[in-house]
């Protein structure tokens, strides 16, 4: 009888004890992320090329660089990285070379060695207690993405695929992805291929790996045309449900820009209210969106700052209505005087980062809906080639993709003033014990000021 009671008590203790593996997964509870039972608010960056570095034949430019850069990021409190799962196709697209090597070099055919790079990245991140957001594909051309699926299935011609389309032509082309059944099937095969992977370094299945925080449908998936909105909404719902059917442990999100991406706040909320979508994201690009002119940065900055605050506010209110977190997962500003030199000043950029991270910190301090902020992007120790504006195959990868000037938005490891600012926010983050305003007791912590802590 005593032995039976002891066994029963032991079983109850084991049942009550939290699983260490499960507690290491980022989870969502209402409007907050939880990690190891505590609210999770983070400073992060975009490091899409991190999965490609271990594939470099030159160790100094590849795995050694990766390890140095991860150590650098951890030292500065950047613990959340948004990365690419794999590219599709090869060669020029829209007049520019794309990143690679590709995970899916040909329609329906996969190169398993390409995921060796993601294996190494996740293993190294795990050693440093970092979390990854992994996006499966791309609305834009620089990794193949939706245009490649459209070309493989004959929806667009090779000439339209190769040449630089006008904005309206590009919108017309990409919008056809959502109604193209074989295109969607090809995309889903890539999703399934990644989800079925077992890490060759750790021996852990991706679906069992707590280093991965979330799966993202794509980088900036847009309907592109209002006529595609219903097909777009159906694709999001079906894809999110499919991912959850394969993997219940990880979060799912879309990789969205916000209402500018859908041209409708109503559609933005509708696709993020889906029960299989765990949180919303926004991206903010003052120069790209015409809020600020590159040759009038100082003059236009106040307008850009106000529009940024308004955009964040609109999406915070949407997140509150949905009772889900929101992440500011891309934002950036050009260097002063629109320079691409790593030695040029970043006064306006630092001021802009202070603005965006200030919104994040006030949320973190008060248990709000803005859970994370990932700046775009980390250039690390790479440097642009003198006299060469755009990336060419063989060059070191940086945060700016091939169709953009290298160092347009990327942050170098040598940008001391920017890292000083990030350090201050990251230090404050580590000391935060978030309390929701409704639950705060009288005399509790007050919201942070607008200033850098």
Image (cartoon, rainbow, N blue to C red):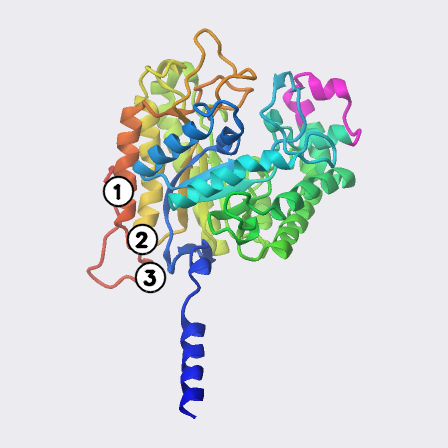
Residue 158 lies in the magenta-colored region? yes
Q: What residue do we see at 40% from left, 76% from top?
A: 13
Q: What residue do we see at 43% from left, 41% from top?
A: 125
Which mark, by number, is residue 366?
Answer: 2
Residue 317 lies in the magenta-colored region? no
Q: CA distance from mark 2 to mark 1?
A: 17 Å
Which mark, by number, is residue 215?
Answer: none
Label 3, residues with CA under 10 Å away: few <14, some 14-19, many ≥20: few
Residue farthest along the bottom direction in this orientation: 1
Where are the magenta residues, as a range? 153-170
Q: What residue do we see at 53% from left, 56% from top?
A: 249
Placement of 113 over or under 246, stated as above or below:
above
Q: Are marks 1 and 3 in contact (CB under 8 Å)?
A: no
Q: Position of residue 400 (x, y in %)?
A: 48, 24
**Is any part of residue 381 visible from this angle?**
yes
Q: Earlier in the sequence, mark 2 or mark 3?
A: 2
Judged left or right of residue 37, residue 391 is right
Q: What residue do we see at 50% from left, 36% from top?
A: 83
Q: Quadrant of the N terminus?
A: bottom left
**Circle 3 sits on which residue?**
438
Q: CA distance from mark 1 to mark 3?
A: 26 Å
Q: Quadrant of the C terminus?
A: top left
Residue farthest along the front direction in this orientation: 3
Q: Earlier in the sequence, mark 1 or mark 3?
A: 1
Choose top left, top right, bottom left or bottom right for residue 23.
Answer: bottom left
């Amino acid at each position: 009888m005593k032995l039976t009671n002891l066994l029963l008590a032991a079983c109850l203790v084991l049942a009550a004890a939290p699983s260490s593996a499960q507690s290491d997964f980022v989870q969502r509870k209402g409007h907050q992320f939880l990690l190891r039972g505590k609210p999770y608010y983070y400073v992060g960056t975009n490091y899409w090329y991190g999965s490609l570095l271990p594939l470099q034949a030159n160790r100094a430019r590849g795995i050694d660089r990766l390890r140095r850069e991860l150590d650098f990021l951890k030292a500065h409190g950047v613990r959340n990285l948004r990365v690419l799962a794999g590219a599709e196709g090869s060669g020029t697209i829209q007049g520019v070379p794309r990143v690679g090597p590709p995970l899916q070099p040909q329609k329906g055919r996969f190169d398993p060695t390409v995921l060796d790079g993601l294996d190494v990245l996740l293993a190294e991140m795990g050693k440093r207690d970092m979390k990854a957001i992994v996006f499966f594909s791309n609305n834009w051309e620089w990794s193949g993405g939706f245009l490649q699926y459209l070309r493989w299935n004959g929806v667009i011609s090779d000439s339209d695929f190769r040449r630089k389309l006008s904005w309206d032509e590009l919108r017309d082309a990409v919008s056809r992805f959502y109604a193209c059944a074989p295109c969607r099937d090809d995309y889903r095969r890539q999703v399934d291929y990644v989800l079925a992977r077992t890490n060759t370094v750790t021996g852990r299945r991706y679906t069992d790996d707590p280093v991965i925080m979330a799966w993202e449908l794509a980088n900036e998936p847009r309907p592109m045309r209002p006529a595609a909105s219903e097909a777009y909404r159906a694709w999001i719902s079906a894809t999110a449900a499919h991912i959850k059917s394969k993997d219940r442990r990880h979060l799912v999100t879309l990789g969205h820009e916000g209402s500018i991406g859908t041209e409708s706040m109503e559609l933005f909320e509708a696709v993020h209210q889906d029960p299989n979508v765990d949180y919303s994201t926004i991206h903010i690009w003052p120069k790209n969106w015409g809020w600020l002119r590159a040759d009038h940065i100082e003059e236009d900055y106040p307008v850009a700052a106000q529009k940024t605050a308004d955009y964040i506010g609109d999406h915070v209110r949407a997140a509150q209505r949905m009772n889900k977190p929101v992440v500011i997962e891309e934002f950036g500003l050009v260097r002063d005087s629109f320079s691409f030199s790593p030695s040029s000043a970043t006064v306006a950029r630092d001021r802009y980062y202070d603005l965006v991270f200030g919104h994040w910190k006030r949320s973190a301090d008060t248990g709000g809906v803005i859970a994370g902020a990932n700046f775009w992007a980390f250039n690390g120790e790479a440097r642009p080639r003198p006299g060469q504006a755009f990336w060419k195959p063989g060059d070191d990868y940086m945060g700016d993709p091939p169709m953009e000037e290298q160092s347009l938005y990327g942050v170098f490891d040598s940008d001391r003033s920017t890292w000083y600012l990030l350090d201050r926010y990251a230090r404050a983050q580590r000391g935060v014990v978030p309390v929701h305003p409704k639950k705060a007791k009288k005399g509790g912590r007050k919201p942070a000021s607008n200033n850098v802590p």
